[in-house]
Amino acid sequence: MTYSRFEDLPVWQEAVRLAKQVYDLTGRNQKRMSPSLRDQSERAALSVSNNIAEGFERGTTNELLAFLYIARGSAGEVRSMLCSLERRPGLADLKSEISNLKSTAESCSRQLRAWADSLQNSEIKGQRHLNDRTRSAAEQKRRAEAFQKELLNRLPANHPLRQQATASK
């Protein structure tokens, strides 16, 4: 599926949910957490969705990949901060909520990794590189592949070329 807005990306939506939940946790427990720990947790959580958005808007696959890895690092930072919170005296009653937040941060991290993996070997260079020439070349390639597929489908099922094409799928 192709997305035209970062707001429609499931991973961005999950990252926003993570930030909201971290802000909710830190907001309800201000007096039980140090200001610096609260601030860093909130900043790291917000950084996940912000880096997804910035990378998405940059226009090249390489820049998007760089920002996805930064976002993934921020998700790891959130998880690390939550692990620290879990071990703090006086916060034992938050263990379940913190565990759920860690799961959300892990979900963001897994989604970001999967997206980055899919982009690693992609021929797509990004929106910024699209012009009439590259669009024409992509369309020509698509047509050639469709024509080749049509020719193969016209061959008898036992033809070596058709068997070879089927085996390579």
Image (spheres, rainbow, N blue to C red):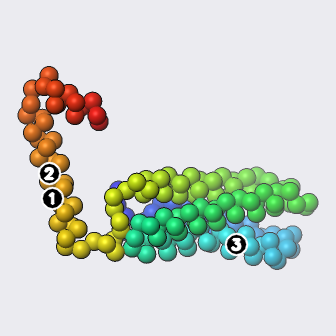
Q: To which quarter of the image does residue 83 belong?
A: bottom right
Q: Is residue 109 visible?
A: yes
Residue in view at x 9 percent, y 39 percent: 151
Q: Nearer the viewer, residue 163 or 16?
A: 163
Residue receiving disc 2: 144
Q: What kind of element bears circle 3?
A: helix
Instruction: Name the mark on residue 126.
Output: none
Q: Are marks 1 and 2 in contact (CB under 8 Å)?
A: yes
Q: To which quarter of the image does residue 38 belong?
A: bottom right
For discs 2 and 3, the disc positioned in front in the rendered view: 2
Residue in view at x 21 percent, y 61 percent: 138
Q: Are marks 2 and 3 in contact (CB under 8 Å)?
A: no
Rendering coords of residue 94 (x, y %)? 80, 57
Residue in view at x 39 percent, y 73 percent: 59
Rendering coords of residue 22 (x, y %)? 69, 66
Rendering coords of residue 33 (x, y %)? 84, 70
